[in-house]
Image: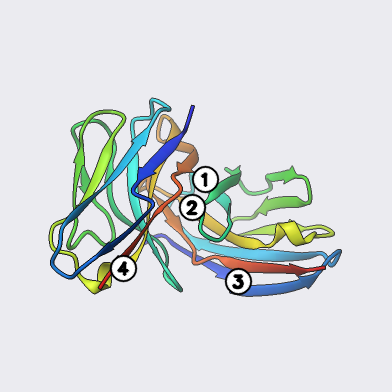
Amino acid sequence: NAGVTQTPKFQVLKTGQSMTLQCAQDMNHNSMYWYRQDPGMGLRLIYYSASEGTTDKGEVPNGYNVSRLNKREFSLRLESAAPSQTSVYFCASPYEIGVYVETQYFGPGTRLLVL
Amino acid sequence: EDQVTQSPEALRLQEGESSSLNCSYTVSGLRGLFWYRQDPGKGPEFLFTLYSAGEEKEKERLKATLTKKESFLHITAPKPEDSATYLCAVQGGSEKLVFGKGTKLTVNP
């Protein structure tokens, strides 16, 4: 039981390049989230998926796209990377009982540097 | 709009010197308040969930309490290994968690 896994762990991109961050969870949870974490800004929600086949924008969605491939996998794509997207990206999946989140499990993060 | 404010931003303690971290929140219909610990270069690690005012939870040297406006994370006789950033988050009516910016705790031996 690995919980939430993310790949890659670290990536360097040039401005304008594209890449996809991968996330998978083995806890059979319905919801999955993508956050970015920047110094002094805390964790900010980029996109989320409440169930397989659905996705919604969070607080900072511009410049990103997502795909909920199946119940286990939720990917985040940067179509044309910009230096402002340099950040640490976390995938998370909550254990929910009805509308209540009991806890939210996080992956180890992907550190992205855009030059 | 749900908001979470954590204070102080940074706290430096001597080993054994007890203290508290504060998490103030405004939320429409609190469903849960969460505390996480985050070590450098790692993802947040779950500590506690509190659901209603008056609730308290403990784990080793940590104790979390909740009122209608704020939560405290009390650290009793801290050790250097308690050094980390502590994050607070709330779940309101929107069902998504809103995070504070965190308190960076340093415990010196």
Question: What is the C-alpha distance between the residues marked 4 and 3?
Answer: 26 Å
Counting labels gives: 4
Front-most of A8 and B106? Answer: A8
Q: Are circles 2 and 1 on residues that touch, CB within 8 Å? A: yes
Front-most of A35 and B98? Answer: A35
Residue type for callout 2: Val
**Residue pointed to by mark 2:** B90
Question: What is the C-alpha distance between the residues marked 2 and 1?
Answer: 6 Å
Question: What is the C-alpha distance between the residues marked 4 and 1?
Answer: 31 Å
Which circle marks residue B32 in the picture?
Answer: 1
What x and y, as percent, mark residue A31? 34, 36
Q: Chain of mark 2?
A: B
What x and y, as percent, mark residue B104? 61, 68
Report whether B28 appears left or right of A31. Answer: right
Q: Residues within 10 Å of mark 2 (few under 14, many from 20)?
A: many
Are the residues under marks 4 and 2 on the same chain?
Answer: no
Q: From the image, which quarter does the C terminus of chain B lie in?
A: bottom right
Residue type for callout 4: Thr
Question: What is the C-alpha distance between the residues marked 4 and 2?
Answer: 26 Å
**Residue pointed to by mark 4:** A86
Q: Chain of mark 3?
A: B
Which circle marks residue B7 in the picture?
Answer: 3
Front-most of B70 and B82? Answer: B82
Are the residues under marks 4 and 1 on the same chain?
Answer: no
